[in-house]
């Protein structure tokens, strides 16, 4: 076959197509059925439910699995993830979650800076986890559920922070604020009929603003310093007092030693005297004389010069002279 | 089989034609519809979802939201009653309650937002300027209560102000005010909330200064508490040292005194058996102790010793 003009080609096409012309209705029917069939089957994942609308009107909610619906836009199915727990972050953003999650280094101070009840400013970061408990409410009652969660979360957290003191939010009242925030968020979301349930609200970092941080650190240091000074004082105390106690014991023991010594000596001397006395009494005169003379015998040779003077001689002047000469 | 199929196809074509021609229309769960005929509204707005019919070609459908809608205010700088300048950021939730009136008065959501801006902002401004700052920040007097429990707080004087209304009630006030004006736009205002309140930048810096000053004060307090405690412990130490040594001294003295006393008794008891003999012995002992190599002895002729000498001499 020769193709001389484009007409020839078309003619050939027409001729060929003509062969199938009688099948046309059947082909269209099959196509429609195929499209219909693909539009009639839908599947719902394990973590979702399907909300089915017929001509826009809600008719039913289907669970996970394979289902059939009317095709050609008569039935519309919207899958809603009811099992998943969603998370919203405030004052921070997770860039890449993982074992060590990476957080955005940008500051979201618009969200996180807030006034506390004592009119100070804090940088508060927190997260909210929520899930969808009522997909029908979620789809049909509010236009932007995520916006609602975000707004309500900010409203509640800022109101609560505004009701506590800086110290409270920074330290002791965190748990209390978490619990209250969850409760009050839920209350407001319920009043909007969002079909959302707050799973948890958790305060993350709560910090004083960067400008004020050094001053806060200074307080911590001062606390440490206080402890240190007190410890040093106790150290000095512990160094001195037990030692003094020991020394006091020594003083007392020494005194007791003195007492023992004194009494034993006294007893000894007394007994010696008594013993001597007993013997002395047997012949007092001679003993007395003997003792006297013995003593003198012992004593007199010791002295260098001895003079015997007449008691009649009253003046001792000559003696002094003698002594002087003798001394030379 | 072929008949059923044919009927089915015809039905589908019919439906498509119905929609294409404008005879039928669908109202989603989230929508409501106002039917207009050459621009003029016809009947009541359609709020029931599902398949509806109208006159084709001459009637038009206008769709409106049925769901709860957001309104987010522009942050507004407002002075409070105590002349503090603050940024107030409000948010509201609203609904189209009367689609027809809505269409007539504000046309669409953009128009509605503009009106809501007006009424909510003015109500907010009224409420904020009529109250002091702490009323807008706090919700209760919780802080004052904790302060009364003796917790140390960093408080400024204005913060100790007792509040009468608080944030929640203030929000209710704003809602009440703004709500009155909403129905004329076919709008139902459901909720107005204060989302953010913040000092304007200039004031914020001052607040930081104040916080720093306060923290420094607290730091000084801790330091001086430390010093005070140290002084106390030092004093305690000195006291205990004195107590220990003096007690020991006292005990020692008592022990010694008792011993002295006892020894006196012992001596006295022994020596009183013969005082003369005792003094005699003691005299002799004194001799022994006092006379040594440097002593010059002068013996009187009538001394005892001499007496002995002469006595014996005479006897010989």
Image (spheres, coloured by chain):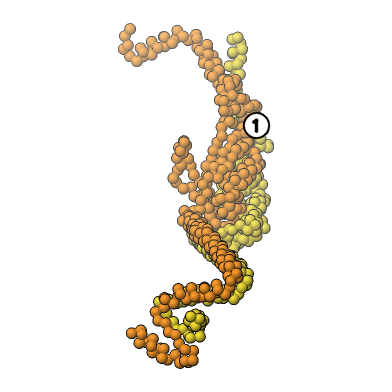
Chain colours: A orange, B yellow
Residue sitting at x 58%, y 60%: B155
Residue sitting at x 49%, y 53%: A209
Looking at the image, which residue sits at the far front? B316
Residue sitting at x 60%, y 47%: A177
Q: Quarter-wise, where is residue A84 in the image?
A: top right
Circle 1 Cα neighbour tier, 10 Å, few/some/many (<14 / 14–19 / ≥20):
many
Name above or below for residue A51 compared with residue B36: above
Q: Nearer the viewer, residue B310 or B190?
A: B310
Q: Is residue B102 visible?
A: no
Q: Position of residue B191 (x, y in %)?
A: 64, 46
The number of callouts visible is 1
Name above or below for residue B189 compared with residue A71: below
Q: Quadrant of the C terminus of chain A?
A: bottom left
> What kind of element bears circle 1?
loop
Q: Chain of mark 1?
A: B
Q: Position of residue A51 (x, y in %)?
A: 61, 28
Q: Position of residue B7 (x, y in %)?
A: 61, 15
Name above or below for residue A8 compared with residue B15: above
Q: Nearer the viewer, residue A78 or A314?
A: A314
Q: Nearer the viewer, residue A27 or B41?
A: A27
Q: Quadrant of the N terminus of chain A?
A: top left
Query: Left or right of A109: which side holds B138?
Result: right
Q: Is residue A283 visible?
A: yes
Residue sitting at x 58%, y 44%: A153
Q: Quarter-wise, where is residue A248 in the image?
A: bottom right
Identify the residue position indicated by label 1 in the image: B49
Q: Position of residue A92 (x, y in %)?
A: 49, 44
Q: Nearer the viewer, residue A171 or A247?
A: A247
């Amino acid at each position: 076959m020769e193709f001389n003009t484009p007409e020839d080609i078309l003619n050939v096409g027409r001729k060929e197509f003509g062969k199938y012309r009688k099948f046309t209705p059947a082909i269209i029917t099959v196509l429609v059925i195929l499209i219909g069939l693909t539009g009639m089957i839908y599947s719902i994942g394990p973590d979702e439910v399907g909300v089915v609308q017929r001509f826009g009107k809600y008719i039913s909610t289907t669970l996970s699995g394979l289902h059939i619906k009317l095709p050609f836009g008569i039935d519309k199915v919207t899958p809603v993830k009811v099992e998943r727990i969603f998370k919203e972050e405030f004052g921070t953003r997770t860039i890449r979650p993982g074992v060590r999650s990476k957080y955005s280094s940008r500051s979201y101070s618009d969200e996180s800076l807030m006034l506390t009840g004592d009119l100070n400013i804090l940088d508060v970061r927190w997260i909210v986890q929520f899930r969808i408990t009522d997909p029908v409410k979620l789809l049909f009652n509010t236009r932007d559920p995520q916006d609602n969660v975000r707004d309500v979360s900010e409203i509640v957290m800022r109101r609560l922070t505004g009701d506590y003191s800086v110290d409270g939010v920074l330290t002791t009242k965190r748990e209390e604020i978490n619990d209250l925030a969850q409760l009050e968020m839920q209350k407001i979301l319920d009043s909007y009929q969002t079909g959302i349930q707050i799973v948890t609200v958790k305060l993350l970092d709560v910090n004083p603003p960067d400008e004020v941080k050094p001053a806060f650190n200074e307080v911590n240091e001062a606390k440490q310093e206080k402890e240190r000074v007190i410890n040093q004082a106790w150290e000095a105390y512990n160094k001195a007092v037990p030692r003094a106690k020991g020394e006091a014991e020594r003083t007392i023991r020494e005194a007791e030693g003195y007492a023992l010594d004194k009494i034993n000596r006294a007893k000894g001397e007394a007994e010696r005297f008594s013993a001597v006395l007993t013997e002395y009494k047997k012949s007092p005169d001679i003993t007395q004389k003997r003792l006297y003379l013995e003593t003198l015998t012992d004593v007199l040779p010791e002295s260098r010069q001895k003079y015997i003077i007449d008691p009649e001689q009253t003046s001792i002047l000559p003696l002094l002279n003698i002594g002087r000469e003798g001394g030379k | 089989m072929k008949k059923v199929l044919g009927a089915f196809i015809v039905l589908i074509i019919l439906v498509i034609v119905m929609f294409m021609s404008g005879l039928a229309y669908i109202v989603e769960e989230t929508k409501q519809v106002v039917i207009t005929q050459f621009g003029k509204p016809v009947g009541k707005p359609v709020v029931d979802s599902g398949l509806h019919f109208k006159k084709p070609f001459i009637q038009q459908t206008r769709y409106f939201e049925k769901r709860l809608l957001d309104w987010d205010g522009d942050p507004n700088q407002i002075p409070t009653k105590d002349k503090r300048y603050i940024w107030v950021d409000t948010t509201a939730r609203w609904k189209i309650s009367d689609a027809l009136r809505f269409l007539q008065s504000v046309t669409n959501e953009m128009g509605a937002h503009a009106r809501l801006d007006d009424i909510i902002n003015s109500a907010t401004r009224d409420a904020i300027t009529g109250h002091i700052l702490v009323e807008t920040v706090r919700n209760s007097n919780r802080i004052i209560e904790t302060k009364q429990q003796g917790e140390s707080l960093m408080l400024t004087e204005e913060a100790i102000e007792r509040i009468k209304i608080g944030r929640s009630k203030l929000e209710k006030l704003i809602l009440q005010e703004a709500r009155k004006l909403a129905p004329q736009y076919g709008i139902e205002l459901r909720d107005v909330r204060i989302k953010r309140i913040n000092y304007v930048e200039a004031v914020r810096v001052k607040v930081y200064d104040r916080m720093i000053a306060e923290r420094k004060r607290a730091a000084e307090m801790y330091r001086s508490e430390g010093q005070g405690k140290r002084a106390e412990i030092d004093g305690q130490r000195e006291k205990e040292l004195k107590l220990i040594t003096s007690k020991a001294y006292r005990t020692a003295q008592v022990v010694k005194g008792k011993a002295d006393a006892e020894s006196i008794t012992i001596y006295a008891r022994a020596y009183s058996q013969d005082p003369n003999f005792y003094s005699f012995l003691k005299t002799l002992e004194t001799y022994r102790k006092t006379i040594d190599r440097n002593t010059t002895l002068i013996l009187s002729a009538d001394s005892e010793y001499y007496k002995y000498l002469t006595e014996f001499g005479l006897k010989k």
